[in-house]
Each structure stands twice: as C-alpha cells, then as structure tokens.
C-alpha cells in the first residue's frame, strides 16, 4: 500500500504563487509516476502535471508555462510550483501515484488540498 501526504495550498491573489508538496510512504517501490490532478466544483478531475521515475514530465495544457513539477527521489517527494495563478486555477488539488498493485496498474490518491485564487 502507498500513502500520500500533501501539504501547501491555500488562498492567494491573482498573479501569485504557491507550492504544493506530496510525500509518498509505504510500498514506494511500486510507484512508476507521481503527479497532481485537480477538480473544480462541477467539473471533471483533470491532469495538472505528472513526472515518471525516470523524469518524463507531462503538463495539462492550461498550466503549461506557469506550473513546474519536480521530484526529490531521495525523499519520495514531488513538488508543484504554481506561478501566475488565475481564478480558473481554483480547485482541490490531489496528489496521485501510479504503479503496480498485485500485478495490475493502480492509482493511489491523496486526500486533496484546496487552492483558491482570488480575483
């Protein structure tokens, strides 16, 4: 089993910055990739950014050029630096880890942290 502990988030004005952190514990050897998804009220959950164990990075179109994902393998932690925040970035941000569980692809999720961008 994998546990994900998130930190960061909060309230910020338009144009501001925030940094999210997510630390994995437990069966971390099972993890192939980590990242962040977000879900705003009334909308589907969407990819924000992800990074694989070998450093391949993927960003959602709406955050390219503004957000940066990075990974500290020694501490099993992934960071999301969010700059030039907009009100449309307001959502609950969930940490995600992808890997294998009993031989099958599996997603682990954090509880989520609220990011609110005021106009």
Image (tube, rainbow, N blue to C red):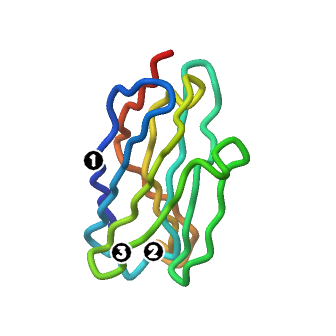
Q: Which mark is residue 31?
A: 2
Locate residue 42: give its quadrant.
Answer: top right
Q: Are marks 2 and 3 in contact (CB under 8 Å)?
A: no
Q: Residues within 10 Å of mark 1 (few under 14, many from 20)?
A: some
Whole-angstrom CA distance, mark 1 to mark 2, is 20 Å
**In the depicted structure, whether residue 11 falls above or below residue 29:** above
Give the mark nearer the N terminus: 1 vs 3. 1
Q: Which residue is mark 1?
A: 7
Measuring from the top left, give residue 3's x and y in whole percent: 29, 60
**In the depicted structure, whether residue 15 falls above or below residue 76:** above
Q: Residues within 10 Å of mark 2 (few under 14, many from 20)?
A: many
Q: Which mark is residue 98?
A: none
Measuring from the top left, give residue 94's x and y in whole percent: 44, 44
Q: Are marks 1 and 2 in contact (CB under 8 Å)?
A: no
Q: Which residue is mark 3?
A: 72
| Marker count (numbered) | 3
Quarter placement of the N terminus:
bottom left
Whole-angstrom CA distance, mark 1 to mark 3, is 15 Å
Give the mark nearer the N terminus: 2 vs 3. 2
Q: Residue furthest right?
A: 61
Measuring from the top left, give residue 6's x and y in whole percent: 30, 50
Q: Residues within 10 Å of mark 3 (few under 14, many from 20)?
A: few
**In the depicted structure, whether residue 87 falls above or below residue 111:** above
Q: Residue at x 35, y 26 (%)?
A: 11
118 left or right, relative to 22: right
Q: Residue at x 43, y 78 (%)?
A: 30
Q: Nearer the viewer, mark 1 or mark 2?
A: 1
**Which of 92 and 27 lies nearest the eye of the viewer?**
92
């Amino acid at each position: 089993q994998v546990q994900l502990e998130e930190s960061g988030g909060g309230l910020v004005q338009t144009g501001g910055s925030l940094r999210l952190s997510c630390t994995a514990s437990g069966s971390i050897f099972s993890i192939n990739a980590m990242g962040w998804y977000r879900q705003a009220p009334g909308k589907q959950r969407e990819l924000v950014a992800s990074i694989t164990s070998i450093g391949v990075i993927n960003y959602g179109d709406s955050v390219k050029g503004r957000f940066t994902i990075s990974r500290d393998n020694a501490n099993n932690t992934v960071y999301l630096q969010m700059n030039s925040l907009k009100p449309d970035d307001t959502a609950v941000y969930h940490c995600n880890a992808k890997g294998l569980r009993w031989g099958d692809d599996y997603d682990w999720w954090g509880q989520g942290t609220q990011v609110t961008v005021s106009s």
